[in-house]
Image (tube, grey):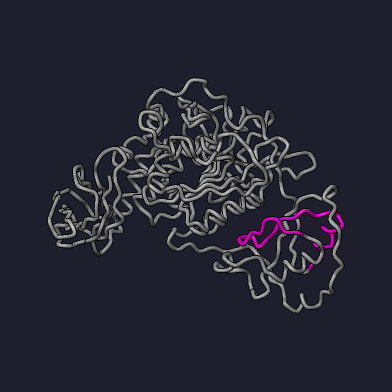
C-alpha cells in the first residue's frame, strides 16, 4: 500500500492509463445507438487519462471533472451518464449489449464493469429492544472501550467535520440532534439515491457517534460538525448501488470532512448482477474500496463496519469482511457482545491478499441509539460499532489535527487490547479510547508550535464555561486568561496549569451579559494570544 500523507498534505494519485490525443482524432463519428432500458444493465465506464494528461494522472487531476470530450463521444452513442466520478475518472450509465460493445471499442475507454447492486441480507441490525435504554445507557458501551475519560476531559470532536455514508437520516430531527441545529453544526445532508424511503438506520448510526441527550445518549463526537450523504436505498424493490457510494464519498470530501463513517457494505447482490467473491477482497477490486483509498490519499480517515456476515466457519456463511472494509487504508470495525465475546455476526478476515481484518472491535450488540418517534432503542450490528470508533477518531483529530489516516489507524491498533497478538477475528483487539487519544495528544506535544496559538472559543455543552483551545510552545507550564469588555474593563481572570501542545482553557461566564468580549491568554513564557468572542445566553 502506498504511503498516505497527513490531512494537511491531502495528496493523491489516480489510477489511469495514458492515451494519445492523435488516437482520439482518428475516431470517426458514430451513429447513436438506442438504449432499451428493459434490456440494459448498469455499468461503470472507466476512462483513460484526460486528453491534456500525457502521463498517469497526478494529485491535482482528481479535482478536475470527467473530460468533456469523452462525455461528448459517449453521448453521441446514446449514453446518458448518471454518476461522474472525478477520482476514478469514470461514469456510470445504463448500457444495452450493443451499446456496451460500442463503448468498449472507444480508444479512451479502459473497460466497462457492472455496477453492483445490494440485496439487503436479512436485517442490517438486530431487532430493537421495545423499551428505551435506561438513562445514561451509552455509558455501558463507552466504558467498555475506555471512552468516558476523554468525554470527561472535554473532548467531543469540536472543530472536526464528521461525514456519514448511510441510508435515511430522517432529516436528523430526533431530539438527540437538537444541539447540532442550535449550535449551527449540521453541515448538510444530501440524498444521492432515487426515490423516497423511510427507516432510521442513518439517524441511528449518527446518534451513536454524535448524539447529545444527557441522561439518555451522549456520543463521543457530540461537539463535531455533521454531514450526511444518503447512498443506500433500503427498499427491497430498489437497489443500493456502488456508484451512489462513490458519489457520496466524493461529495463529503469536497465539503472538507476529516473523518467518514460508512456503516454499509457490499458482498452478494441481486440475481443477474455481478457479485463479489472472497477472492475479490484484495483491497483493489471493488470500486467502493478504491474510492475509500482515494479518500485516504486526500487525508480523510474512513471508518467502515466490517459486516454482519460472520459465523463459525467459512462454509456456513459469507464469513469475511465486506467491501469496502477490505480497503488498504480503511479502519474496519468488528463487533463484540456486552460480555466482550465476539458477536456471532461479526465478519472476519483475512482479506484475499492475506491482510488481517477487522482492525479493531467495539460493542456491537445492544447499543443504545436514536429510534423512531423520538424514542431510543438498543440495536445490534457492526453498523453501530463503527460510529463509536468514528467518534473516537474525531476526538483524536480534535486534539491533534495533523494526524493522517494511517497514523490514526496505527494509534488505534497499537493501543487496543491484543496489539501484541492480532488475529483475524478481533484484529488488534478492543479499542482503548483513552490510550489512543492520549497518544494522539503526546504526539501533538512533541511537535509544539513556536508561538502561542488560540483557536475559536466555544461554550461547554454541560456547564456555563467558555472553552478557549490553545496550542502552546515548549516549556509552557501555566496560563493566565482574562476577558475584557469592548471598553477594556476586565470581567474575568483565571490562572490554569498547562503544558506544551494542545490545551483547553475554561472560564466560567455565568452571569456575564450577552455581547462581544476580548480575551487575552498569556503563558508563563511571556507569549500572548488575543481574540474576540461573542457570548450569548
39, above or below 426, in the image? below
Does residue 204 appear left or right of residue 468 in this picture? right
User: Which residue occupies 51% across, 59% down?
Assistant: 298
Does residue 71 appear left or right of residue 527 in this picture? right
- The percent position of residue 224, horizontal first and vertical second, equals 40, 47
- The percent position of residue 302, horizontal first and vertical second, equals 51, 49
Q: Quadrant of residue 76?
A: bottom right
* Camera-nearest residue between 271 and 214: 214
Q: Which stretch appears magenta? A: 80-106
User: Which residue occupies 59% across, 45% down?
Assistant: 230
Does residue 518 appear left or right of residue 136 in this picture? left
Q: Is residue 409 visible?
A: no
Residue 116: say if magenta.
Answer: no
Quadrant where the C terminus lies? top left
**Number of callouts:** 0
User: Which residue occupies 14% across, 60% down?
Assistant: 488
Residue 89: say if magenta.
Answer: yes
- The percent position of residue 339, horizontal first and vertical second, equals 45, 23
- The percent position of residue 211, horizontal first and vertical second, equals 43, 37
Does residue 1 appear left or right of residue 447 in this picture? right
* Camera-nearest residue between 536 and 215: 536
Q: Quadrant of residue 356?
A: top right
Q: Is residue 56 visible?
A: yes
Amino acid at each position: 500500500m502506498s504511503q498516505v500523507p497527513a490531512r494537511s498534505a491531502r495528496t493523491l494519485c489516480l489510477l489511469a492509463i495514458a492515451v494519445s490525443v492523435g488516437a482520439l482524432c482518428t475516431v470517426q463519428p458514430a451513429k447513436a445507438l438506442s438504449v432499451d432500458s428493459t434490456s440494459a444493465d448498469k455499468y461503470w465506464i472507466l476512462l483513460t487519462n484526460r486528453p491534456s494528461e500525457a502521463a498517469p494522472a497526478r494529485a491535482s487531476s482528481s479535482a478536475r471533472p470527467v473530460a468533456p470530450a469523452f462525455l461528448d463521444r459517449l453521448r453521441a452513442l446514446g449514453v446518458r451518464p448518471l454518476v461522474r466520478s472525478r477520482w476514478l475518472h469514470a461514469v456510470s450509465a445504463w448500457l444495452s449489449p450493443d451499446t456496451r460493445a460500442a463503448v468498449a471499442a472507444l480508444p479512451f475507454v479502459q473497460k466497462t464493469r457492472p455496477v453492483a447492486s445490494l440485496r439487503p441480507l436479512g436485517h442490517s441490525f438486530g431487532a430493537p429492544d421495545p423499551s428505551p435504554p435506561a438513562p445514561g445507557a451509552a455509558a455501558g458501551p463507552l466504558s467498555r472501550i475506555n471512552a468516558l475519560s476523554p468525554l470527561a476531559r472535554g473532548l467531543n470532536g469540536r472543530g472536526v467535520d464528521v461525514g456519514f455514508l448511510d441510508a435515511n437520516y430522517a432529516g436528523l430531527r430526533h431530539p438527540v440532534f437538537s444541539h447540532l441545529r442550535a449550535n449551527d453544526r449540521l453541515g448538510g445532508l444530501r440524498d444521492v439515491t432515487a426515490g423516497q424511503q423511510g427507516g432510521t438506520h442513518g439517524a441511528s448510526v449518527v446518534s451513536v457517534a454524535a448524539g447529545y441527550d444527557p441522561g439518555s445518549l451522549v456520543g463521543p463526537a457530540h461537539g463535531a460538525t455533521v454531514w450526511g450523504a444518503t447512498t443506500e436505498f433500503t427498499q427491497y424493490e430498489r437497489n443500493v448501488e456502488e456508484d451512489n457510494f462513490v458519489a457520496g464519498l466524493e461529495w463529503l470530501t469536497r465539503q472538507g470532512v476529516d473523518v467518514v463513517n460508512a456503516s454499509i457494505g457490499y458482498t452478494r447482490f441481486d440475481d443477474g448482477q455481478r457479485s463479489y467473491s472472497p477472492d475479490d477482497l484484495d483491497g483493489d477490486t471493488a470500486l467502493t474500496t478504491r474510492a475509500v483509498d482515494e479518500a485516504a490519499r486526500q487525508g480523510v480517515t474512513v471508518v467502515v463496519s466490517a459486516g454482519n456476515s460472520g459465523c463459525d466457519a467459512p462454509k456456513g456463511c459469507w464469513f469475511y469482511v465486506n467491501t469496502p472494509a477490505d480497503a488498504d487504508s480503511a479502519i474496519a470495525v468488528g463487533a463484540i457482545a456486552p460480555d466482550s465475546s465476539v458477536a456471532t455476526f461479526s465478519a472476519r478476515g483475512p482479506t484475499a491478499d492475506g491482510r488481517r481484518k477487522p482492525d479493531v472491535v467495539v460493542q456491537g450488540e445492544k447499543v443504545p441509539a436514536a429510534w423512531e418517534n423520538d424514542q431510543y432503542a438498543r440495536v445490534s450490528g457492526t453498523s453501530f460499532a463503527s460510529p463509536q470508533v468514528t467518534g473516537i477518531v474525531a476526538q483524536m483529530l480534535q486534539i491533534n489535527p495533523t494526524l493522517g489516516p494511517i497514523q490514526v489507524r496505527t494509534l488505534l491498533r497499537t493501543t487496543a487490547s491484543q496489539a501484541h497478538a492480532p488475529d483475524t477475528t478481533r484484529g488488534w483487539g478492543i479499542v482503548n479510547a483513552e490510550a489512543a487519544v492520549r497518544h494522539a495528544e503526546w504526539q501533538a506535544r512533541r511537535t509544539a508550535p513556536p508561538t502561542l496559538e488560540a483557536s475559536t472559543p466555544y461554550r461547554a455543552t454541560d456547564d456555563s464555561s467558555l472553552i478557549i483551545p490553545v496550542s502552546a510552545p515548549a516549556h509552557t507550564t501555566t496560563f493566565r486568561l482574562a476577558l475584557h469588555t469592548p471598553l477594556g474593563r476586565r470581567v474575568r481572570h483565571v490562572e490554569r496549569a498547562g503544558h506544551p501542545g494542545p490545551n483547553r482553557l475554561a472560564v466560567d461566564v455565568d452571569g456575564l451579559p450577552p455581547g462581544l468580549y476580548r480575551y487575552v491568554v498569556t503563558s508563563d513564557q511571556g507569549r500572548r494570544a488575543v481574540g474576540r468572542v461573542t457570548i450569548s445566553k
